[in-house]
Image (spheres, rainbow, N blue to C red):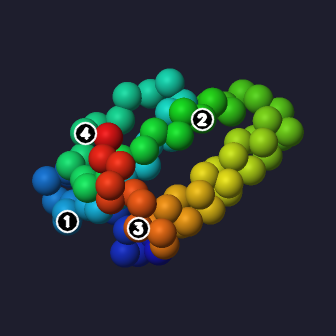
Amino acid sequence: MLENQYSKLLPDIPPVDIVITMGCNVVCPILPSKYREDWGLDDPTGENEEKFRAIIKQIENKIRELAEKIQAGTIWSNKD
């Protein structure tokens, strides 16, 4: 992956269907997409391993929820 992956400028990214921002008290660049969600996660930087594991579990749950929305076709009707 390190050989093929590199940072890209926003204009170099192909059209995007779904954008997920994590929250973490940072501002993400605007990336045009058909659907967008902000998961509003806390930034675990400087926290203990328990806090990291809790955030990982939240991400896992959010991914499952997103997959269910995609399979049900409901995200395309909920544009933010």
Q: CA distance from mark 4 to mark 3?
A: 24 Å
User: Closer to us: mark 2 or mark 1?
Assistant: 2
Q: Say which residue label 3 marks.
A: 73
Q: Say which residue label 4 marks.
A: 30
Considering only order in the chain, which callout, 3 or 1, is on the residue closer to the N terminus?
Answer: 1
Q: Amino acid at mark 2?
A: Leu
* Furthest residue toward top: 25
Considering only order in the chain, which callout, 1 or 2, is on the residue closer to the N terminus?
Answer: 1
User: Closer to us: mark 1 or mark 3?
Assistant: 3
x 20%, y 65%: residue:
14
Q: Say which residue label 1 marks.
A: 14
**Dot 3: what SS?**
loop
Considering only order in the chain, which callout, 4 or 1, is on the residue closer to the N terminus?
Answer: 1
User: Closer to us: mark 3 or mark 2?
Assistant: 3
Question: Is 59 left or right of 31, judged from the image as shown?
Answer: right
3 or 18: nearer the viewer: 18
x 50%, y 24%: residue:
25
Quarter containing the C terminus: top left
Considering only order in the chain, which callout, 3 or 4, is on the residue closer to the N terminus?
Answer: 4
What percent of the width, then of the height, locates residue 66? 52, 59
Tell me the crowding category of disc 4: few under 14, some 14 to 19, or many 20 or more residues within 10 angstroms, Cα based.
few
Q: Amino acid at mark 3?
A: Gly
Q: Say which residue label 2 marks.
A: 41
15 lies above or below 39 = below
Q: CA distance from mark 2 to mark 1?
A: 26 Å
Q: Amino acid at mark 4?
A: Ile
10 lies above or below 1 = above
Q: CA distance from mark 1 to mark 3?
A: 22 Å
Q: CA distance from mark 1 to mark 4?
A: 14 Å
Considering only order in the chain, which callout, 2 or 3, is on the residue closer to the N terminus?
Answer: 2
Whether residues under marks 4 and 3 lie with C-beta atoms below 8 angstroms apart, the answer is: no
Q: Amino acid at mark 1?
A: Pro
